[in-house]
């Protein structure tokens, strides 16, 4: 029964093949080729993604923040495939651009905290686009202000919340880390480098005062010296009016060195920031102006030789005029559009 049934089944299969439409064979062949092509395209995308991630990891191993021009931005951030998030700081580090250097410092602290943490992985990277190196990127994004922080998600275009609200929140590394956690679910613990300058200054001051009191322990009448206390008060006033407290809070760099030409800037070009060297310069200028005013007062109130008083008056007037003009010129360079100047422009 089984042997007789086998030819019958073969005849039935032959009838089904004869009744199969002849036009379906090209369709099946086309479908097969399409599946092969899709599989090859998917494999190509996977290889391209692996190459991009490998390149980004190599850059991250050398620097926590890598700089990008227009070509790199389009290849690694705009063009798919991408399975990683990218935080980009759009900035302009040239001094004449008047961009905040402090924002760059905070961004560097945040990127270093992520790079050297135990949770570091290939799901988040930090990069930077400088206007002078990627102006086409600024034009492509219709961006006309810097610094600006943006998050580019693994899929889709950035939304409004992917742009950090710098004006409202500020650019502290802790605030940036909180914003990144909201956008990527990656939590970064910020580690700031230790700063012992305040501790050292306090220790030196205590040592100086203690040594002076020890040397004069048998005669402490100088404690009641009005001139000495006046000098101490003036030093405190000079320190506060020159921006030392602002330096302590914000922690700006001492100066800025242009990475392209090596030029060092001691005066920040913006009214919203300053360098430590700038506060020292302002302190010296204020002290020189005060010294000039003291000399003028001495020349007017003393009862000594008239010729000597005239010389003291001219020296005091010269100090006030020259250093006030210098101070005013620095003010004009930071507050653009200020119309007034005196001697030095």
Image: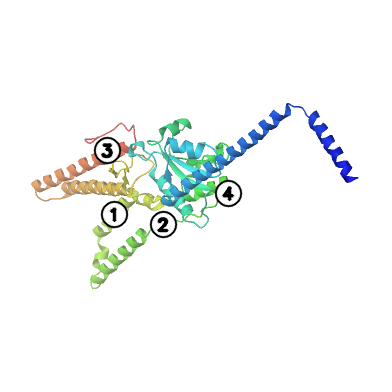
In this view, the residue in front, 5 or 157, is: 5
Q: Residue at x 79, y 29 (%)?
A: 18
Regarding residue 5, the answer to whether it shows in the image is yes
Q: Are marks 3 and 4 in contact (CB under 8 Å)?
A: no
Which quadrant of the structure image shows residue 313? top left
Residue 281 image position (x, y, % from top left): 27, 47
- Distance (Cα) linking label 1 and label 3: 23 Å
> Is the C-beta separation of discs 2 and 4 under 8 Å?
no
Q: Which residue is mark 1?
A: 235
Relative horizontal placement of residue 230, taking residue 36 as reference (left or right):
left
Q: Position of residue 123 (x, y in %)?
A: 54, 48
Q: Residue sitting at 21 percent across and 49 percent down?
A: 291
Q: Which residue is mark 3?
A: 329
- Quadrant where the N terminus sits is top right
Q: Secondary structure at mark 4?
A: loop
User: Residue sitting at 33 percent across and 62 percent down?
Assistant: 200
The residue where tag 4 is placed is 185
Q: CA distance from mark 2 to mark 1?
A: 29 Å
The image position of residue 111, as x and y in percent, is: 46, 50
Lower sequence index among marks 1 and 4:
4
Question: Mark 2 highlights which residue?
Answer: 193
Mark 4 surroundings within 10 Å by alpha-carbon count, few (fewer than 14), some (14 through 19), many (20 or more):
few
């Amino acid at each position: 029964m089984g042997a007789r049934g086998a030819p019958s089944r073969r005849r039935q299969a032959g009838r089904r093949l004869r009744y199969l439409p002849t036009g379906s064979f090209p369709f099946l062949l086309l479908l097969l080729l399409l599946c092969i092509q899709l599989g090859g395209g998917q494999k190509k995308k996977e290889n391209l993604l692996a190459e991009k991630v490998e390149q980004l990891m190599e850059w991250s191993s050398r620097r926590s923040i890598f700089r990008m021009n227009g070509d790199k931005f389009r290849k690694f951030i705009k063009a798919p495939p991408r399975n990683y998030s990218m935080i980009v700081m759009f900035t302009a580090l040239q001094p004449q651009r008047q961009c905040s250097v402090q924002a760059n410092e905070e961004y560097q602290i945040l990127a270093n905290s992520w790079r050297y943490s135990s949770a570091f992985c290939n799901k988040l990277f930090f990069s930077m686009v400088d206007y002078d190196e990627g102006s086409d990127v600024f034009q492509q994004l219709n961006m006309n202000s810097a610094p600006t922080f943006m998050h580019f998600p693994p899929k889709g275009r950035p939304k409004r919340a992917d742009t950090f609200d710098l004006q409202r929140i500020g650019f502290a590394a802790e605030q940036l880390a909180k914003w990144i956690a909201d956008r990527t679910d990656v939590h970064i613990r910020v580690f700031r480098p230790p700063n012992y300058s305040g501790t050292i200054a306090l220790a030196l001051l205590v040592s100086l005062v203690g040594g002076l009191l020890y040397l004069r322990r048998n005669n402490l009448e100088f404690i009641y010296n009005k001139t000495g206390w006046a000098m101490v008060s003036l030093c405190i006033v000079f320190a506060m009016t020159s921006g030392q407290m602002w330096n302590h809070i914000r922690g700006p760099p001492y100066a800025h060195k242009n990475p392209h030409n090596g030029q060092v800037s001691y005066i920040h070009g913006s009214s919203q920031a300053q360098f430590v060297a700038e506060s020292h310069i302002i302190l010296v200028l204020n002290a020189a102006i005060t010294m000039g005013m003291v000399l003028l007062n001495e020349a007017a109130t003393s009862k000594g030789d008239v010729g000597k008083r005239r010389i003291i008056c001219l020296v005091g007037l010269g100090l006030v005029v020259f250093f006030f003009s210098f101070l005013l010129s620095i003010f004009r360079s930071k507050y653009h559009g200020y119309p007034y100047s005196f001697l030095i422009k």
